[in-house]
Image (cartoon, grey):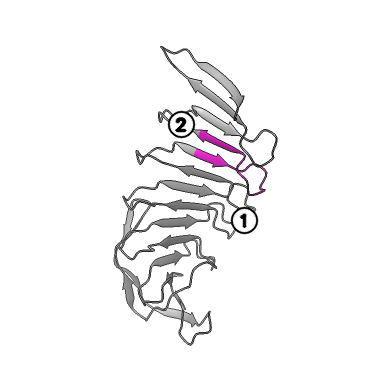
Amino acid sequence: MSEYDEAAVEEDVTAEDYTAEEETYDDTAVSTVEESFDIDGDGYEDEAISADGMTMIDTDGDGDAEGIALDTDGDGISDELMVDADGDGSVESYASDTDGDGLLDTFESDTDGDGYTDQVSVDSNADGYVDQVATDTNNDGYTDTVATDYNADGLVDEISVDANADGTADTVLSDSDEDGFLDTVHTEATPEGDSFQSQTGQVI
């Protein structure tokens, strides 16, 4: 949460109509502010934590919360983060701690504002770095491109593309020599019936 300014929130305020994961969080009241702090030293309180473990986030300092951080398991650590960056009442980004280690490891975003997740980033090995990004590039509700960093060096080692949304990669681009460039392409196609054709070659 270090990339966000955590917001000034007065007692008994309400965050209305936040939607995430197909659930609408409407009239989510912050009944009591337990603690408030001035994190950036500008003289204004920019963090407010309620009795129920909810933290309101104001990224632009206008006094309206663009996000909500939740402590769903009551351990004192936020494990869900919902961000409405443009203030339209719909959450564009959602992050969660799926393995309970105190680190957010799954990040979902609705970049086009249609109410459906179109990109999911995952830190599958809990090293603090995203190692897989799944994207729905054509907004049909199915993941069609997955980029993976297998060795945690920050470079994409493989991109798989499922163009026909059948759940199987049709094209896989990989970095076989680990030089940071995708150099091998493997394609599978079903031109007729159930017969598969497989082809592997070098990227020129």
Q: Report the residue at 45% width, 85% height from top.
A: 44
- Please name the amino acid that badge 2 sits on: Asp
Residue 48, given in percent of the width and then of the height, sits at 45, 77
Residue 182: percent from left, percent from top: 61, 36
Q: Is residue 55 above or below residue 105?
A: below
Numbered disc in front, either 1 or 2: 2
Q: Which residues are magenta?
A: 146-160
Q: Of 102 and 44, which appears nearest the observer? A: 44
157 in magenta: yes
* Image-based side of 95 in relation to 102, left or right: left
Q: Main secondary structure of the magenta part?
A: loop
Q: Nearer the viewer, residue 129 or 105?
A: 129
Q: Is residue 136 above or below residue 189?
A: below
- For disc 2, the neighbor class at 10 Å (few under 14, some 14 to 19, many from 20) is some
User: How many residues crowd mark 1 within 10 Å: few (<14), some (14–19), many (20+)?
Assistant: few
Query: What residue did someone put label 2 on?
Result: 162
Q: Amino acid at mark 1?
A: Gly
Q: Secondary structure at mark 2?
A: loop
Instruction: Determine whether 78 is above or below 142 in the image.
Output: below
**Residue at 56% across / 56% down in the picture?**
100
Disc 1 or 2, which lies upstream in sequence? 1
81 with respect to 148 (left or right): left
Residue at 45% from the left image edge and 51% from the top image edge: 108
Q: List the residue tagged with mark 1.
A: 128
Where is residue 55 drawn, in percent x and y? 45, 71
**Distance Cα–Cα, label 1 vs label 2:** 28 Å
Magenta stretch: includes residue 58: no
- Report which quarter residue 140 is drawn in: top left
Rendering quarter of residue 11: bottom left
Secondary structure of the residue carrying tag 1 is loop
Label count reads 2
